[in-house]
Image (cartoon, rainbow, N blue to C red):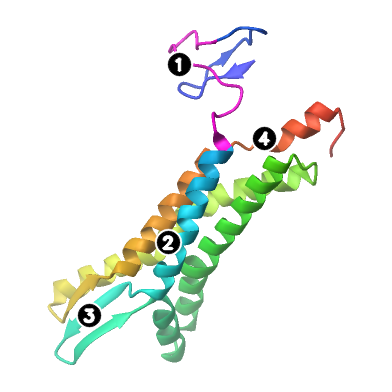
Amino acid sequence: MISCHSCGLLNRHVPGAERETCRRCGATLHSRRPDSLTRTWALLISAAIMYLPANLLPVMHTSSLFGDEDDTIMSGIVYFWTSGSWPLAIIVFIASFMVPMLKLVVLALLAGTAQAGARWRPMQRTRLYRIVEFIGRWSMLDVFVVTLTVALVHFQSLATIYAGPGAIAFGLVVVLTMLASQQFDPRLIWDTIENSGQHHD
């Protein structure tokens, strides 16, 4: 049986057929996502390139009566920590620095082991993929914080805040890693196991 990627209907696989289509929506059926690893690697490399400016460039530019100030993600974390708001500093550090980096590392691990045909711990690798999918939405936390801060400050007419180039780069990192996780086909993890006839826990 092959599941349709468009409507989700299970279709009976016809061995030897040159092209199979879904009997409900007519979409072309694939046992695996076409060029899954190639697309995953391309998106991962792009996200890794954008990760550096996302952390080095300012994410927020503030203009007030006291002057202009540019803040990066790390300077914001340091400010929260030194001002006594250490819970907020920890949350921003995890959501803005650790989560994107771990997503890049985990997706690279999954793509690399699938490409190499590794038989190493398929169940654990599948769980890693599910975790990456689950935490993907929380990677935008610091972008939400910047947006909320801009809205509140503009509402109170205290200062003028603009999103910096670091916020754009960070947004691209989040989007690219989310697309990479969507392009990766977790069934590739199990192909080598099934073809070898091995049993797994």
- Is residue 79 rendered to the left or right of residue 20? left
The residue identified by callout 4 is: 188
Which amino acid, mark 2? Met
Please tell me whether mark 4 or mark 3 is closer to you in this view. Answer: 4
Residue 151: x, y in percent?
A: 21, 68
Which amino acid, mark 4? Leu
The picture quadrant where one finds residue 157 is bottom left
Residue count near mark 2 (Cα–Cα under 10 Å), binned few <14, some 14–19, many ≥20: many
**In which quadrant will I find the N terminus?**
top right
Residue count near mark 1 (Cα–Cα under 10 Å), binned few <14, some 14–19, many ≥20: some
Q: Earlier in the sequence, mark 1 or mark 4?
A: 1
Q: Earlier in the sequence, mark 1 or mark 2?
A: 1
Q: Earlier in the sequence, mark 3 or mark 2?
A: 2
Which amino acid, mark 3? Thr
Residue at point 51%, 76% (across, down): 90
Residue 123: x, y in percent?
A: 75, 43
Stretch of the chain drawn in magenta? 19-36
Which amino acid, mark 1? Ala
The residue identified by callout 1 is: 27
Mark 1 falls on what kind of element? loop
Residue at point 52%, 20% (across, down): 4
Residue count near mark 4 (Cα–Cα under 10 Å), binned few <14, some 14–19, many ≥20: many
Q: How far is mark 3 from mark 2, CA to CA?
A: 23 Å
Q: How far is mark 4 from mark 3, CA to CA?
A: 47 Å
Please tell me whether mark 2 or mark 4 is closer to you in this view. Answer: 2
Q: Earlier in the sequence, mark 2 or mark 4?
A: 2
The answer to the question of whether label 4 and label 3 lie on touching residues, with beta carbons closer than 8 A, is no
Mark 4 falls on what kind of element? helix
The picture quadrant where one finds residue 170 is bottom left
The residue identified by callout 2 is: 50
Please tell me whether mark 3 or mark 2 is closer to you in this view. Answer: 2
